[in-house]
Amino acid sequence: MVDTYIVDKGGNQANAASVTVPANRDFRGAWSLSGSVISEDMDAAKEIFKDKVREVRAPLLEAKDVELMKALETSADTSAIATAKDALRDAPAASAIANATTITELKAAWDTATLGDNPYA
């Protein structure tokens, strides 16, 4: 039988059979090993979450840029587009992310109105 090892964010490793592992693996990059228990480092989890927000918003911002250029060409009102772009730019700094104290709260911080479907749902 081959042992399986889990490596935490700090490079520490433990035999998977001998540690308590979180049921959810969405923030595996934020795992921290303490004895035989793996917990999620909330600061690291928030950074992973923000990176996902940035990944998802990139194509949304590009689409808004196209929409903006088309509106400018026709002298249409661009205020709604500008507001949407501001919301996308501000998404990683949302207070719900900063205020989250658990992984469940962090997952609930996904702004579906701005970013679309929650990848953590």
Image: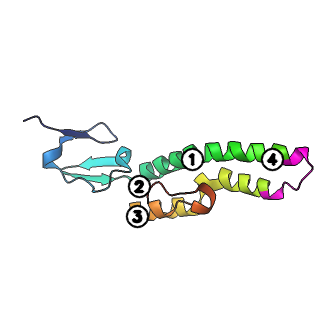
> Based on the displayed image, in which of its 4 quarters is residue 59 positioned?
top right
**Residue occupying the point 63% across, 58% down:** 114
Percent from the top left, x then y, of residue 54? 58, 45
SS under mark 4: helix
| Residue 44 as seen in the image, left or right of residue 115 | left
- Please tell me which of labels 1 and 2 falls first in the chain: 2
- Any magenta on residue 58? no
Task: Determine if residue 44 is in view.
Answer: yes
Question: Start and end of the magenta stretch?
Answer: 71-80
Q: Amino acid at mark 4?
A: Leu
| Residue closest to the eye, 91 or 74 | 74
**Residue occupying the point 57% across, 47% down:** 56
Query: What residue is pinned by disc 3?
Result: 104
Query: What residue is pinned by disc 2?
Result: 42
Query: What residue is pinned by disc 4?
Result: 68
- Please tell me which of labels 4 and 2 falls first in the chain: 2
Query: What residue is pinned by disc 1?
Result: 56
Task: Give the CA separation, mark 2 to mark 3.
Answer: 11 Å
Q: Against 116, is 61 above or below?
A: above
Q: Amino acid at mark 2?
A: Met
Quarter occupied by the N terminus: top left
Query: Given contact means CB atoms under 8 Å apart, are the residues at marks 2 and 3 in contact?
Result: no
Task: Give the CA separation, mark 4 to mark 3.
Answer: 36 Å
SS under mark 1: helix
Q: Amino acid at mark 1?
A: Val
